[in-house]
Amino acid sequence: MLKKKPAIDKKPEQAVNFRTLVPQDFAEEDTSCSASSSEINQSRFNSLSRKKEALPPVVSRVTTLLCEAESKATSRDFAKSVELLEKATTLGSACAAAKLGLVYHGGLNSTVNPDYASAAAYYFLALKLIYMIPNNKWDMSLLLDVIAGLSEIYRKQMCRTEDGDIWNTGVKAMRHIECTLMDPSMTKFLSHKDNQKCKAARIHMNFCLAMTAEADGEFTEALTLYGTCKRIGECNFATADKLVKKAHTKIRILERQIPKVKPICISCDFEPKELSDIWKLLVCSKCQVVAACSRECLTTHLATHNKKEHEA
Ligand SMILES: [Zn+2]
Ligand SMILES: [Zn+2]
């Protein structure tokens, strides 16, 4: 039986010796974590076995662990399967870390209780391991699995204030990954399908980053990030497409909250240079589109409203 892990102070990255990092274990064709049909497993197993001779020992060790974990899961020996995945993760397998993220995210019968903090920790570790390999070898299916899982935790389980530490760790990781994915030199060699996955991952990340900015009261930043989701557009992945629609709604709501007032006095043209002085400007309560530097200037401006109404 698996021991319940302490939630947040669990730092799996410290347990991993990065010198044993094994990028190849997920860099080949489709090592997607979610496939479960035995036929696919069989063919994957065969292709992995065929590769075995040529691979360095640690890679073949990880490959064996992943295959064993899969077959233990198939025969419903979940405790053993988790144990094997943990071993593979310690050897630097991003795929194993991602699978553990999924396991803790959803729970596993009576073997593992859902635990979003552990799930997030394993997802972060997977991202870290992916980030450490050359980006032309990134497995988009794996990356999207991890990011979609994380995004769900951000949207449904975590609270910006209470889970500040985990939250910020993920934001940092997502910023790094987003920086790489938004680089056209990264995406230009991707297949159409991988490009769509890349887009979906970017939508998830930008949405999480936008949520963060919004929660922190940085509405202009939030608007830009929701705008990025909108610009990336739909990509035929249900959840990501839903987030694009949500981003549209968020933009409409936020635009109403951000006053579109030019920070210049309407009456005397005074233009404050310091942010603190900008905040001191008085916004005209009547038209709400202009500001004034003082009561006097505001009164002068208000008089123009009265005059116009008289003339009308
Ligand atoms: Zn003025
Ligand atoms: Zn006015």
Image (cartoon, rainbow, N blue to C red):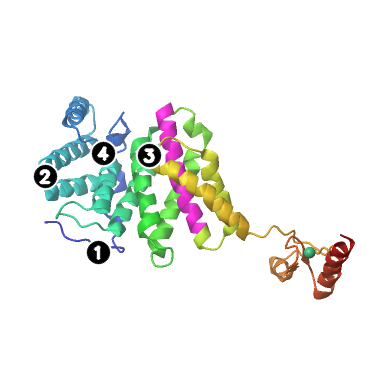
Residue at the disc numbered 3: 133
CA distance separating discs 3 and 4:
22 Å
The answer as to whether callout 1 falls within 8 Å of ligand 2 is no
To which quarter of the image does residue 35 belong?
top left
On the image, the x and y values in percent for residue 150 come to 36, 50
Residue at the disc numbered 2: 76
Tell us which disc is closer to us: 2 or 1.
2
**Contact between labelled residues 1 and 2, with CB atoms less than 8 Å apart:** no
What is the span of residues highlighted in magenta in the rendered image?
A: 192-213
Q: Where 244 sits versus 12, above or below? A: above
The quadrant of the rendering that contains the C terminus is: bottom right
To which quarter of the image does residue 72 belong?
top left
CA distance separating discs 3 and 1:
29 Å
On the image, the x and y values in percent for residue 86 come to 21, 49
User: Which residue is at a point 30% across and 30% down the rendered structure image?
Assistant: 28
Sequence-first disc among 3 and 1: 1
Question: Seen in the image, is 234 located left or right of residue 79?
Answer: right
The quadrant of the rendering that contains the N terminus is: bottom left
CA distance separating discs 4 and 1:
26 Å
Sequence-first disc among 4 and 1: 1
Sequence-first disc among 3 and 4: 4
**Contact between labelled residues 4 and 3, with CB atoms less than 8 Å apart:** no
On the image, the x and y values in percent for residue 236 come to 42, 35
Sequence-first disc among 2 and 1: 1
Residue at the disc numbered 1: 6
User: Which residue is at a point 26% across and 39% down the rendered structure image?
Assistant: 33
